[in-house]
Image (spheres, rainbow, N blue to C red):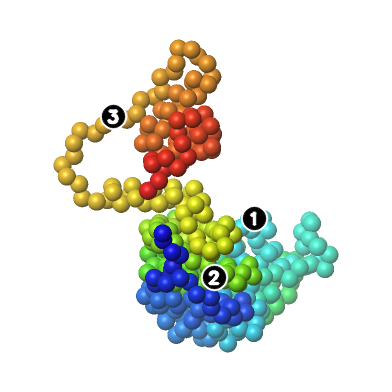
């Protein structure tokens, strides 16, 4: 039978010393796990650390932009100061101005007594990380530009300008140049923020997936207080390498956390510990790869599956079976895809269609 293996070689995972304290998990050295694209990003960042040059991090959601920003702060001369992260996409537009700039008592209806200190002043002496800067409301971009130019903050309802000393790191998954062309992002703010622009690769484009998984499993094991090292079965590691990981590190982290909680006493992560949507992603990747491959001259295509032929009995059960059968036919027997189209769970299809067995060949790889 297959033995669990470490994710980077052919031997069983070996227990290693516990990782250092949490802050050290976000150091540039820790993030450099062998991928040349990431190594190039880190090399560029090292050259500007401590020089108060703004950094703009591009990359898909979940590629580790905040982790990189935290590592930059921790390796900078400002490491003893605060690291304050603000996700511009997660704060309602009506609140983001008061969240960033703070406010005086009575500045607006519902304001706290004694006011509140905004994120800009909370980050004084340290680093402010503005995640999803492309989602910042256009009118607020003018106020942020003034802070960057004049290094002062005016809380809402206050006539005082408070000096502020912060390093700025921004991140986005959007194309800011395109947003400028559309009139949705200020060009002057863009050029103020992009002193150094780096791009983090998608997880599926990285060459260090095995090492990354190894580190993440070590952290999971330590966090759970387990003495049993975690390993990954060879067939599962092969699937990890093929997966497109549309959710990047966020998806991988959640998957490993769940799988680690489900493993047996041997500590091996096997395919039965993986969620259904992982196999859906894997199947879509396989179908996409097949579609990209060179093909011979095309033969006449098979007609699409017909709409369901409703049974003469008119019984609800019979109609339901016909609808499900037609959906399965349209999706080549793919239960997950049929369930998504019909807006039901896979279990509903299995229950209504006894002939469709969980784990049958069409749902496997």
Residue at horizontal 56 percent and vertical 80 percent from the top: 17
Residue with the most extreme front position: 1
The residue wearing badge 2 is 229
- Residue 49 lies, in percent from the top left, at 50, 84
Asked whether 230 or 85 is in front, the reply is 230
Q: Residues within 10 Å of mark 2 (few under 14, many from 20)?
A: some
Q: Which mark's residue is nearer the viewer, 3 or 1? A: 3
Quarter-of-image position of residue 70:
bottom right
Mark 2 or mark 1: which comes first in sequence? 1
Residue with the most extreme right position: 113
Q: Give the number of the disc on residue 82.
A: none
Q: Which mark's residue is nearer the viewer, 3 or 2? A: 2
Q: Label 2 near label 3: C-beta < 8 Å?
A: no
Residue at horizontal 58 percent and vertical 87 percent from the top: 77
Mark 3 or mark 1: which comes first in sequence? 1
Q: CA distance from mark 3 to mark 2?
A: 52 Å
- Residue 358 lies, in percent from the top left, at 47, 40
- Residue 211 lies, in percent from the top left, at 44, 72
The residue wearing badge 1 is 92
Is residue 105 found left or right of 95 in the rendered image?
A: right
Q: Label 1 near label 3: C-beta < 8 Å?
A: no
For residue 142, above or below residue 359: below
Q: Give the number of the disc on residue 303.
A: 3
């Amino acid at each position: 039978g297959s033995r669990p293996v470490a994710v980077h070689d052919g031997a069983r995972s070996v227990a290693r010393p516990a990782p250092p304290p949490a802050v050290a998990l976000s150091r540039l050295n820790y993030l450099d796990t062998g991928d040349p694209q990431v190594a190039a990003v880190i090399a560029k960042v090292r050259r500007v650390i401590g020089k108060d040059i703004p950094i703009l991090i591009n990359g898909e959601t979940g590629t580790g932009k905040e982790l990189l920003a935290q590592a930059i702060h921790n390796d900078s001369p400002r490491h003893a100061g605060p690291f304050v992260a603000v996700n511009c996409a997660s704060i309602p537009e009506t609140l983001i101005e008061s969240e960033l700039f703070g406010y005086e008592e009575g500045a607006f209806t519902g304001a706290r007594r004694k006011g509140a200190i905004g994120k800009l002043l909370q980050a004084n002496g340290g680093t402010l990380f503005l995640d999803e800067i492309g989602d910042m409301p256009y009118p607020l971009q003018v106020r942020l530009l003034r802070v960057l130019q004049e290094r002062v903050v005016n809380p809402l309802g206050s006539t005082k300008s408070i000096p502020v000393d912060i390093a700025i790191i921004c991140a986005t998954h959007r194309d800011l140049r395109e947003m400028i062309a559309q009139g949705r992002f200020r060009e002057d703010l863009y050029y103020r923020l992009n002193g150094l622009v780096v791009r983090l690769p998608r997880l599926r484009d990285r060459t260090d997936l095995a090492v990354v998984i190894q580190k993440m499993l070590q952290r999971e094991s330590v966090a759970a207080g387990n003495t049993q090292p975690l390993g990954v079965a060879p067939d599962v590691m092969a699937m990890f390498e093929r997966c497109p990981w549309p959710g990047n590190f966020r998806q991988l982290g959640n998957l490993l956390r769940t799988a680690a909680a489900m493993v047996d006493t041997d500590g091996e992560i096997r395919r039965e510990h993986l969620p259904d949507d992982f196999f859906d992603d894997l199947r879509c990747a396989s179908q996409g790869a097949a579609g990209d491959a060179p093909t011979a001259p095309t033969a006449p295509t098979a007609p699409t599956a017909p709409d369901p032929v409703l049974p003469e009995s008119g019984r609800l059960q019979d109609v339901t079976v016909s609808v499900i059968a037609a959906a399965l036919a349209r999706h080549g027997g793919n239960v997950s895809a049929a369930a998504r189209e019909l807006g039901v769970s896979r279990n509903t299809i299995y229950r209504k269609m006894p002939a469709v067995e969980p784990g049958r060949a069409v749902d496997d790889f």
